[in-house]
Image: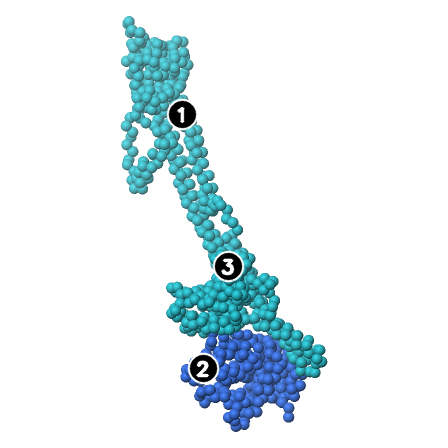
Amino acid sequence: MARPPFRLGIRAKLLLVLSVFLAIPWLGYAYVQEVERVLRDAQEAKLAGTAQAVATALHDRPALFARPQGGDVATAGAAEIEAILQGLTRTTARIFVVDRQSNVIARVGTLQRREPDGAPPPQGIARVAAWFERIVVHPLYALLLAQPTEDFSDDFLGRPLPFAKEVDRALAGILAVDRRTSRDGRVGIVAAAHPVWAGDAVEGAVVVEETTNAVLAQRNRAFERLFTLVLALTLVGATALAVFASRLSSRIRRLRDEVEQAIDAKGRVRRIAAGSAAGDEIGDLSRSFTSVLSRLADSVAHREALAARLSHELRTPIAVVRSSLDNLQGDAVAAHGRVYVERAQGGLDRLAQILTRMSEATRLEQSVGEAEFERLDLCELVRGCVEGYRSAYAPRAFVVAMPAEPVAMRGAPDLLAQMLDKLVANAVEFGTPDRPVELRVEHDGGVARLSVANEGPPLPEAIADRLFESMTSARDEAHRGGATPHLGLGLYIVRLVAEAHGGSAQAQNRPGGSGVVVTVTLPVG
Amino acid sequence: MSRRIAIVEDEPAIRANYAEALRRHGYEVAAYSSRPEAMAAFRTRLPDLAVIDVGLADEPDGGFTLCRDLRAMSATLPIIFLSARDSDFDIVAGLRIGADDYLTKDASLHQLTARIAALFRRVDLLAAPPSSEDVVRRGELLLDVKRLTASWKGVALPLTLTEFWMVHALARHPGHVKDRDALMHDANIVVDDATITSHVKRIRRKFAALDPAFDRIATVYGMGYRWLAEGGS
């Protein structure tokens, strides 16, 4: 079956599924932004409260906003206002008081945070974690999130005031809260302006400002915690899943490899061991493969045993016919009857020959097991056999090419000769009648290659991979029949003998399709 | 007095055919279809020769058992196995328990009667003094064609009938290659090449048992076998 051009393994697929986890940090980010909004609202409310508290302290004290003689700016009470403010100031807030003309008459505090309180240096594993955070995590987050910084400037001299809008609204009698960025644009600033009342009139306004750094820091911390947790979980999950997927795919691969090799080139079936004891679906798969393959093996064995059984079962009825005919011949049979008896006997002889051939392979299988191996010279054996073939198949020519020196090997000469008989018989039968059969012995390292080639039609493709199985024949109708019966056992016998010697047999078309060459590879030495 | 042959065969048609053919050759024939029936008859009276099928009705190895029992009753009674089973294993097993020959059912009646006649001749002549005219001598090998006995270096060689005829065919013309068909013809058997091979193997083994250095029977690969003359090839 053709493979799909684009392949994605189980492992890759599972990891792809795992990428869904990557949506979690995004969800976390949305959540953290919500938190940030809430924190901001709280900050604004708090600043508004502070502004109101300061304003309350200044209410109904017009003297504080009195203008000095000849001055436009109400600085008369500035010192007192500052004293009041000092008592109210917060560490990270900046408080201004302006008069009706938006002139700053007092200010205290700074937006910059003071030196952070020195936390104790982390110990042990925490130190490694802190180091890891500083080196890896923080730079990563810096890319994603705005970081609070104390390195900014929001100084201003004169007008317009950076918080002019809020002041205007406060002087109009409305509490105003707004946000802006610092002059240099590096931090966000929240400002709340509250009117200072004297009776029904607005005497001035109080402006309380704070950076958004505290909120940012909190938001970032929340996000970092969440993100670190999700990242860790994702990593653990991905690792577990990858290990699981690797194991799964390696088991399936092992099973596939075994299944592919379960039926060897010769059609023999092996048992599947991979996963056969597993309780999951792969185990089931392995077991069903085993059962399917064992059924296949049964049918292969059945086919190979069929010849032997058939020959055995047919012997008795043939013996009945033969002995009857023999008796008939012994009796006085009329002349015209004798012809029929002879014909029947001729047919019976052929039948008996078929049976003998059918059991030949089985008998060979038995004798292969008991064969006595001895040291022999392959060249000498081939030379001797060819002498026999030259007389047996005259006038067919035989061309022999072999090395001058002996090719020594361990083998059973009878079996090897029988194998060569089959190879030559095939070559003679399928070869072009007036062309020679070519035998070749090659000695190459640890192996000897014995090949028999003939000119003639190429191997039929349909049975190319089953040639060496029992009862497979390449004969077409033109080759069928005739005096000698053929059962497709010849190359099966070749294979049996080759395998008994630890070798193998292959059949190929000669280059150019001008014929067929069967090569037997045998270990030597 | 005519000779009495026992046929033990479970297939009625074959049994009847063999019995009739042998009767026509002048033998007295007793046919049995099972081992117990045959044994019962043998206890009363032994035949002069027995032809036994290996598989008997419901006893797959009944013939072997019968042969063993019969051999215990008589050491010289000729016994021939006639069986559809032709594996080396069966042939070796049959000959080991004392049969004089093992034929497959491919054998014709003619081949069977030739064997029976030869075995009777051997029995008859065992008592008589050897006559030199029917002896083939090839170096250390001595073949008594009449009695169908062989000896190597003066020691008797226990050959079956088939084996004797094969050795005879080879040794009659030393140096000549006898192909498998010729051996089959001379030995009055119809078997396949592999069986010929195992017959030759058994013959060599019997010679080697007497003389480990025996190497007279040479294989001519792809052709057949030949007897090597003394000191030559």
Please tell me if label 2 and label 1 are on a single chain: no
Residue A31, quarter of the rendered image: top left
Q: Which chain is blue?
A: B
Residue B72, image x, y percentages: 55, 86
* SS class, disc 1: helix
Disc 2 from disc 1: Cα separation: 118 Å
Q: Amino acid at mark 3?
A: Ser
Please tell me if label 3 and label 2 are on a single chain: no
Q: Which residue is mark 1?
A: A40
Q: Amino acid at mark 2?
A: Leu
Residue A279, image x, y percentages: 50, 54
Of badges 3 and 2, the one in the foreground is 3
* SS class, disc 2: loop
Residue B22, image x, y percentages: 64, 85
Q: Which residue is mark 3?
A: A514
Mark 1 or mark 3: which comes first in sequence? 1
